[in-house]
Amino acid sequence: PEGTARLAPDPALGPKLAALTLRTSFMMNALASEKHLHVAPTQVLDKQGGVLCSSNVSLIREGSGEGFAWRDRVTRFDIFTIAVPRHVHRDQWQQYRWNTDKALVKERVDLAVACAAKRGVQVLAMAPIGCGEGCDHPHLEIADIIHQTVKASARGSLEELVVASDDPSHDVTWFAEFETVLLNGRAPPVKFGDPTYPASPATKLIPYLKYGPRKKIPEPITPGRELRRTFL
């Protein structure tokens, strides 16, 4: 989320982040990012809308079930970090109320996917961006943004896109809706109450029957107001 004071995860925030720091070398990459960028990472992410690429992050330990044992084979991957606003305004159809909010998220997702393709990434895994971890974006809009990005972008070496989440609120129903929009895109919702219905037939027929189809309807004559004078 935007406004995060630090890029490096804090192990005190929970076992998931603690496992991230124990199992991978991402902590070292995060701590060294400011030295390489010569500016705070949040300045690049929040103010400039950029993307940070932590390359060659190593997965060196097994999970907690194996006691974080050292792995026989080290797996390396890249991590691309972007920032999105924590909270946005929604309308009654669970869309972004303001087009600028959706455009900002789409611009940053486009940039991350383009960077991954440029780096030669073959399999790109991402979370439902803006859904969870302190953010509250409409999840079907996020799925539609990812769908449009992958469909329109030059994929390069990108062969597969994986969207995964371990958020407890993302249940089976939630992910079923998300997957449908992710694969097919989101159709515009039917917005009842819009003034899209035709005018009443009587409104159109009365001038036609009275004056004919080719005659101009005369302007109504308003009688002049009688001049009044008042003497005191």
Image (tube, rainbow, N blue to C red):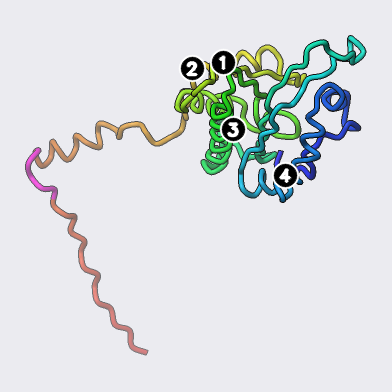
Which of label 3 and label 2 is nearer to you?
3
Q: How far apart are marks 3 and 1 (CA)?
A: 15 Å
- For marks 3 and 4, the one nearer the N-term is 4
Dot 2 surroundings within 10 Å: few (below 14), some, or many (20 or more)? few
Distance of label 3 from label 2 (alpha carbons): 21 Å
Query: Which secondary structure type mostly characterizes the magenta part of the structure?
Result: loop
The quadrant holding residue 170 is top right
Check the picture and name the quadrant holding the N terminus: top right
In the rendering, which numbered label is found on residue 36?
A: 4
C-alpha separation, residue under disc 3 versus residue under disc 4:
19 Å
Q: Residue 184 carries which label?
A: 2
* Image coordinates for residue 56, horizontal then vertical, percent: 71, 27
Q: What element carries label 1?
A: strand
Residue at numbered disc 1:
160
Name the image quarter holding the C terminus: bottom left
Residue type for callout 1: Glu
Residue 183 visible? The answer is yes
Q: What is the x, y in percent for residue 40?
A: 74, 48
Q: What element carries label 4?
A: helix
Disc 3 is placed on an element classified as: helix
Counting residues from the start of the chain, the first of labels 2 and 4 encountered is 4
* Image: magenta residue range: 213-217
Q: Which of marks 3 and 2 is nearer the N terminus?
A: 3
From what the image shows, is residue 81 above or below residue 146? below
